[in-house]
Image (spheres, rainbow, N blue to C red):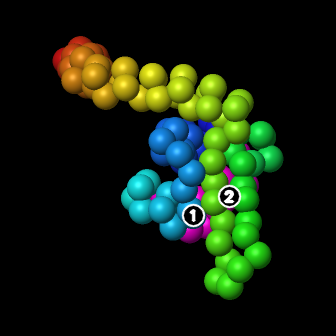
Amino acid sequence: MSSRWGVLILVSLLDGTHRFSELRRRMGGVSEKMLAQSLKALVEDGFVRRVSYPVVPPFVEYSLTPMGHEIAQRVAALKDWIETNLDRVLDSRRRHEEAVAG
């Protein structure tokens, strides 16, 4: 849950159930291996439910568990705050770097 990709997965699953390929497209930039590892960890931690259907080709869906929904809402609120306040944070960083350099 504390990884960058784990946070993005949780937020992506807030709007419902998704297949692996859908999650990968939504998160852009994540490798297949990293997404698989992150999903596995979230399943093991009890935040994500994995349902595999016995069909050809394999069909797997991921959704939030009740505990996953709780944490995803909190993470989404943090994401929203960061997006809203990013300019303030970057301005603060720039002022700090200027003060250190000069």
Q: Residue at x 72, y 55 (%)?
A: 50
Q: Secondary structure at mark 1?
A: helix
Which amino acid type is marked by label 1? Phe
Quarter placement of the N terminus: top right
The quadrant in which residue 48 appears is top right
**Residue 34 on the magenta segment:** yes
Horizontally, residue 54 falls left or right of residue 9, namely right
Q: Is residue 88 visible?
A: yes
Residues 62 and 78: in front is: 62
Residue 12 is inside the magenta segment: no
Residue 94 in view of the camera: no
Question: What residue do we see at 78% from left, 40% from top?
Answer: 45
Q: Quadrant of residue 65?
A: top right
Percent across and percent down for residue 70 are 63, 26
Q: Tell me which amino acid carries mark 2.
A: Gln
Q: As displayed, is residue 69 above or below residue 55?
A: above
| Quarter placement of the C terminus | top left
**Most frequent secondary structure within the magenta stretch:** helix
- Of callouts 2 and 1, the N-terminal one: 1
Residue extent of the magenta highlight:
29-42
- Find the distance from the CA under tag 2 to the CA under tag 1: 12 Å
Say which quarter of the image contains residue 46: top right
Q: Position of residue 9 (x, y in %)?
A: 54, 46
The residue under label 2 is 37
Q: Residues within 10 Å of mark 1 (few under 14, many from 20)?
A: some
Residue in front for this viewpoint, 15 or 12: 15
Position of residue 87 in the picture relative to residue 9 (left or right): left
